[in-house]
Image (tube, helix red, strand yellow):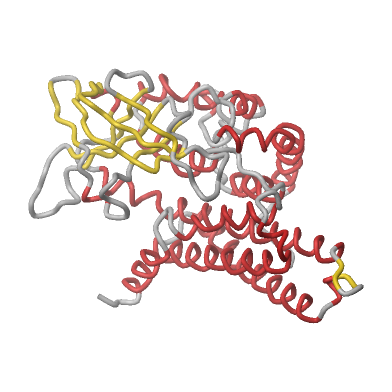
């Protein structure tokens, strides 16, 4: 079906991204997977192309684009090529909105030029070993001593943590027994601060080229000048960006489902069994037709969500609906595609195996499918 969210400038951007991915990512992607992370130079190259700073203000070297559709194009083109550029999606779609929204003038002068150029990479540290979706239960704590905080605690499952120069850390700075959501603060910890340790890289089922690490903080002295926004107000800040974060996951899910379908159509036309191509069997045709229809339905739903996000009207419940539907769709499609690949689909060198492994986490991060259902049910008035 024809899509209406793209303008000519988006398509021009698409061509640039497609050329970059084909030349600078696809040939070396196996090396990235083996290393567990892309080299930092790739982000500087993306900075030269204007991609790292496309959503950053022009006065600090950015492109001044507030149009999220460019982020959509970037995700679609990496999915089309069957790759991910490490923590890039998290950096652009999840973390930078916090910097743009809550940095003060001095912080913008310190950090924005490096972010725009690709010299400074970011991560956000929310999850802890004993906490997942319940962010109000974090134990990492910071006490204020004059013009600085002293930070102690640990975080886990941190995307991009090994590459990050700036890490937004959610910590408790005060306690209100009547409301445990109060008293949370965002501090920006810089790479190299004494007591800040980047721990082991965690081995994952999929997303092999995206580093996921443990972080620890032992008496880390963090200047008050590194606080994002007001003290004790972080829980509200985190909720403000959740619609975009969840929509971004859905964008990748639909794009990767479409990539899986395209790969499968190509494969079944070339693979022969019982003297005829697999594509000639009725079951193959019906499966592919059904998946194509599901993807188009998911794409239409997603594009409506993108339009609402750009317009500033996407509600948390609708973002949850889009994420729930699109990630579950991705899981169904990729599983059925792998089935049509037969035994080759179970071999890790096959492209569908990579998509299958990468797909599983989308129903977990950014809020599990169960959390999405809880949010949706509350919007229906169910307690």
Give me the residue at 67% from left, 54% from top: 347
Residue 283, picture quadrant? bottom right
Q: Nearer the viewer, residue 328 or 17?
A: 328
User: Percent from the top left, x then y, of residue 252?
Assistant: 58, 53
In this rendering, position of residue 130 left or right of residue 367: left
Residue 153, picture quadrant? top left
User: Percent from the top left, x then y, of residue 171?
Assistant: 23, 38
In this rendering, position of residue 350 left or right of residue 331: right
The furthest residue to the bottom: 282
Vertical arrangement, residue 251 with respect to residue 140, above or below? below
Q: Nearer the viewer, residue 59 or 327?
A: 327
Give me the residue at 35% from left, 39% from top: 125
Give me the residue at 72% from left, 59% from top: 344
Q: Nearer the viewer, residue 182 or 103?
A: 182
User: Percent from the top left, x then y, of residue 379?
Assistant: 34, 71
Q: Nearer the viewer, residue 91 or 107?
A: 91
Vertical arrangement, residue 26 with respect to residue 268, above or below? above
User: Percent from the top left, x then y, of residue 157?
Assistant: 39, 43
How many numbered tags mark residues here? 0
In this rendering, position of residue 77 left or right of residue 267: left
Q: Quadrant of the C terminus?
A: bottom left
């Amino acid at each position: 079906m024809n899509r209406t969210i793209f303008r000519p400038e988006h398509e021009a951007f698409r061509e640039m991204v497609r050329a970059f991915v084909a030349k600078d990512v696809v040939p070396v992607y196996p090396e990235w997977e083996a290393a567990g992370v892309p080299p930092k130079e790739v982000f500087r190259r993306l900075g030269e192309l204007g991609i790292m700073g496309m959503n950053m203000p022009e006065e600090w070297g950015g492109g001044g684009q507030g149009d999220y559709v460019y982020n959509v194009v970037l995700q679609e083109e990496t999915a089309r090529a069957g790759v991910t550029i490490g923590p890039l999606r998290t950096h652009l779609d999840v973390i930078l909105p916090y910097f743009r929204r809550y940095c003060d003038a001095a912080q913008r002068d310190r950090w924005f030029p490096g972010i725009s150029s690709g010299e400074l990479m970011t991560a956000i540290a929310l999850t802890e070993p004993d906490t997942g979706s319940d962010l109000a239960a974090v134990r990492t704590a910071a006490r204020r001593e004059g013009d600085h905080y002293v930070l102690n605690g640990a975080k886990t499952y941190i995307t991009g943590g090994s590459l990050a120069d700036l890490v937004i850390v959610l910590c408790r700075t005060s306690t209100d027994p009547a409301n445990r959501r109060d008293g949370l603060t965002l501090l920006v910890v810089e790479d190299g601060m004494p007591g800040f340790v980047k721990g082991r890289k965690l081995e994952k089922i999929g997303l092999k080229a995206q580093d996921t690490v443990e972080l620890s903080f032992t008496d880390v002295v963090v200047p008050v000048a590194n606080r994002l926004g007001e003290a004790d107000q972080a829980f509200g800040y985190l909720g403000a960006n959740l619609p975009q974060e969840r929509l971004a996951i859905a964008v990748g899910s639909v794009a990767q489902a479409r990539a899986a379908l395209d790969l499968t159509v190509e494969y079944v036309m070339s693979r022969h069994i019982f003297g005829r191509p697999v594509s000639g069997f009725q079951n193959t045709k019906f499966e592919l037709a059904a998946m194509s229809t599901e993807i188009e339905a998911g794409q239409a739903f997603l594009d409506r969500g993108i339009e609402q996000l750009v317009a500033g009207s996407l509600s948390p419940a609708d973002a949850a609906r889009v994420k729930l539907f699109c990630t579950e769709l991705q899981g169904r499609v990729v599983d059925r595609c792998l089935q049509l690949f037969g035994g080759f689909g179970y071999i890790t060198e096959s492209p569908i195996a990579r998509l299958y492994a990468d797909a599983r986490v989308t129903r977990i991060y950014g809020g599990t499918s169960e959390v999405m259902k809880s949010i949706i049910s509350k919007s229906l008035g169910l307690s």
